[in-house]
Amino acid sequence: MSAPWPCGPRRVLVVGVDGVRLDLLPELHTPHLDGVAGAGFLARVEVDEATPTMSGPCWATITTGVGVAKHGVFGNHLGGNRLDVFPDFTTRLAAVHRRRTFAAGGWEPLFLARSGGPLFAAPGRLSYIAPLADTPEAWEECDERVTAEAEYVLGRSDDDPQASFVYLGAADETAHFLGCGEEYRRSVEAADRRLGRLLAAVRGRASYPDEEWTVIVVTDHGHVPAGGHGGRSELERTAWIAACGPGIVPGGPVRPPHHTDVAAHVYAALEIVPDPHWTLDGRPFTAAPEPAPVPASGPVPVPAG
């Protein structure tokens, strides 16, 4: 009989919102993302010169904690990857550390054995919900269904994933079809409302008062105004990370973050020291020289919408 799953107070939720331009966020109504940023930080991320500004390599870097030279994903077809050596954090945590993990979304290469995937090889629980068509409207419906599934899983203390990744892809698809105009902006705002539902599900857990949650919201790349990415322009190379939780002091990270830092911070938030053989390229967002004291008021709350 296998050993029981470890269960401590730490939990991590990573929400990946594909293709959201940083320069447009100040113009949009995103109260839930603003709440995460206010409780921690929101900072620009530059996609490095070695990484194509495409979803496949960027999400691989975000979830594995290593760059393209190691994980081997250079396009939206993930073939030729080294994800068996450099797995995503949901797979590694489930296999190596016996942690309950969860991943959900609707883009095939992330979740299915197609196009060289999946990126998420073996989380404890996986929910793939396909869009019914390749249209902005179908992707909005897909994201709605993904969000509903994630609300159900995150809100259940009995299922209790300790590390989760929820992928929302409608904004990126809308930009590809319609450019970065009003429809795209409405799609980003819809993604923020879905983020709010996920945060509410976390806060509604019966065990929430005894837990310490880290929330990370991240995008993979930007878009040119007409929609599209893959080039080296500043708009395409500009991404961002927002995060809050234990050890993250409101007001900004200690240094400019990189996509590789997301997985590194997931491990740190769960108080896991990475094995040197993992050769992670990232570091936690805030590397204080000594542990910060626990506030008298208790755990850092998940921000309300």
Image: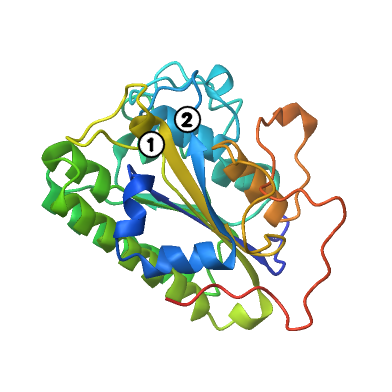
Seen from the viewer's position, the closer of residues 79 and 290 is 290
Q: Is residue 130 left or right of residue 73?
A: left
Q: Quadrant of residue 65?
A: top right
Label 1 crowd (10 A; few <14 / some 14-19 / many >=20):
many
Q: Position of residue 107 (x, y in %)?
A: 30, 41
Q: Quadrant of the C terminus?
A: bottom left
Q: Is residue 94 left or right of residue 146?
A: right
- Whether the residues at callouts 1 and 2 have beta carbons within 8 Å, the answer is yes
Q: Is residue 173 above or below residue 247?
A: above
Q: Which mark is residue 221?
A: 1
Seen from the viewer's position, the closer of residues 98 and 30 is 30
Q: Secondary structure at mark 2?
A: loop
Q: Position of residue 289 (x, y in %)?
A: 86, 50
Q: Is residue 141 above or below residue 48?
A: below
Furthest residue in direction right, as rendered: 290
Q: Position of residue 48 (x, y in %)?
A: 51, 25
Task: Determine the residue positioned at 68% across, 62% down.
Answer: 249
User: Which amino acid is tagged 2?
Assistant: Val
Q: Quadrant of the N terminus?
A: bottom right
Number of numbered discs present? Answer: 2
**Color style of the picture:** rainbow
User: Which amino acid is tagged 1?
Assistant: His
Task: Determine the residue positioned at 33% across, 23% down.
Answer: 77
Seen from the viewer's position, the closer of residues 157 and 245 is 245
Q: Which mark is residue 90?
A: none
Task: Determine the residue positioned at 41% across, 30% down.
Answer: 237
Q: Which residue is mark 2?
A: 47
